[in-house]
Amino acid sequence: MSETSLADLEQIYDALAQAIDRAGPAKSELLLVKFALLLGQAMNDRAGFERLLEAALQDL
């Protein structure tokens, strides 16, 4: 897997922030859960997904 450039990462962040805004406060959590499930399916790597999930929990 190739590393994402800083510019690409910023665009990913912007796209995610815009999607959260479009979903609105009442549905942003549902959007994130649905998106995480879709990413997990696309990854086809349960262990890798769980490692990323643990990384996301760090420093909350």
Image (tube, rainbow, N blue to C red):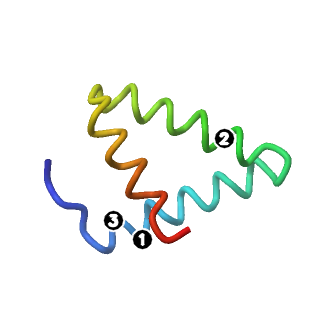
Q: Is residue 17 above or below residue 35?
A: below
In this image, 50 relative to 56: left or right? left
Q: Which residue is mark 3?
A: 8
Instruction: Tell me the tag on residue 22.
Output: none
Q: Amino acid at mark 2?
A: Leu
Q: Residue 13 appears at what percent x and percent y? A: 49, 64
Q: Amino acid at mark 1?
A: Glu
Q: Residue at x 71, y 45 (%)?
A: 29
> Quick one: SS at disc 3?
helix
14, 60: nearer the viewer: 60
Task: Name the residue at 53% across, 58% down.
Answer: 15
Nearer the observer: mark 3 or 2; the answer is 2
Q: Nearer the viewer, residue 12 or 44?
A: 44
Instruction: Read off the residue under disc 2.
Output: 31
Q: Earlier in the sequence, mark 3 or mark 2?
A: 3
Give x and y (percent) for residue 30: 71, 38
Task: Give the camera-side residue of 48 and 4.
Answer: 48
In the picture of the structure, the residue carrying the numbered disc 1 is 10
Relative to 27, say whether 14 is above or below: below
Label 2, label 1: how far apart the Cα atoms are: 20 Å
Mark 2 crowdedness (10 Å alpha carbons): few <14, some 14-19, many ≥20: some
The answer to whether marks 3 and 1 mark residues whose Cβ atoms lie closer than 8 Å is yes
Indicate the secondary structure of the residue bearing disc 1.
helix
